Amino acid sequence: MKKSAYKRVVLKLSGEALQGKKGYGIDPSVTGAIAKEIKDIKRLGVQIAIVMGGGNIYRGATASKQGVDRIIADYMGMLATVINGLALQDVLEKAGVMTRVQTAIDMQEIAEPYIRRRAVRHLEKGLVVIFVAGTGNPYFSTDTAASLRAIEINADVILKATNVDGVYSADPKKNKSAKKFKSLKYIEVLNKGLKVMDATAVSLCMDNSLPIIVFNLTKKGNIKRVILGEKIGTAVK
Ligand code: UDP
């Protein structure tokens, strides 16, 4: 039986990861497939917390450019992450994986409040904890929420799921000569302005020596490969 390379991980899922080819919202076949992969990796004995994004439904910065007050727009974005988190909870529990959703903005009928020690206890008992509502503060991102939660719960690594194979020198979909980096230093990511996570998220990881692995979620079995320690994607450390 293969074993996980990590004891505890934070998986950062962007909202886009749930929308599949639809270009908006949630595609049940995509969330179902993610749930199956997560069920599969639970067998490797790894503790998994998921930080859920919301960009498939609402992005504060985009809406504010269209005239919506930035702070209201950001709260709407945070609420979008709650919708996604509940969708993920549904498919995971249908797949037989026990979960808890913890929210940074209180809504007691829907989810538990974020309580660090309780989150850790759930993880120790083998539940998957889904963190929603980001950091609870406007002007932040769910990437920053992922860095913050990962540090708070002492995760070994952040697994940042994307739809390309890692971090490239340019957009590989537009530029054929774009080069993939196998590994990067935090400071290189910041200096080169590479699109790994936003600068706040990367500097939080840098200050706390928390590695980030950027990998392609759209390739089947990739979450498992990363968890087993296979060198796919790009490692930022
Ligand atoms: N957001 C926020 N504070 C946070 C996390 C998220 O205000 O701590 C808002 C912000 O408007 C953002 C939206 O929620 O655009 C959705 O999150 P994000 O863009 O990070 O989602 P992703 O790109 O991962 O789908």
Image (cartoon, rainbow, N blue to C red):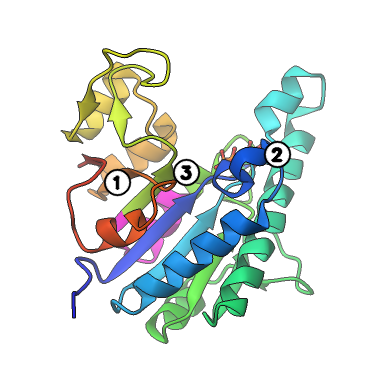
Residue 149, image x, y percentages: 44, 58
67 is within the stretch colored magenta: no
Does residue 142 sit above or below 155 in this rendering? Answer: above
Packing grade of label 1 (10 A; few <14, some 14-19, many >=20) is: many
Q: Is residue 199 left or right of residue 84?
A: left
Q: Nearer the viewer, mark 3 or mark 2?
A: 2
- Quarter of the image containing the C terminus? top left
**How many numbered discs?**
3
**Mark 3 CB lies closer than 8 A to ligand 1:** yes
Which residue occupies 68% across, 50% down?
26
Give the residue number, with chain letter if any, for mark 2: 24
> In front here: 203 or 192?
192
Q: Nearer the viewer, mark 1 or mark 2?
A: 2
Residue 24 seen: yes
Residue 82 location, quadrant: bottom right
Does residue 182 sit above or below 168 in this rendering? Answer: below
Identify the mark at residue 144; answer none if there is no mark: 3
Residue 151, image x, y percentages: 36, 57
**Mark 1 CB lies closer than 8 A to ligand 1:** no
Dot 3 amino acid type? Thr
Q: Is residue 235 left or right of residue 28?
A: left
- Quarter of the image containing the N terminus? bottom left
Q: CA distance from mark 1 to mark 2?
A: 27 Å
Q: CA distance from mark 3 to mark 2?
A: 23 Å
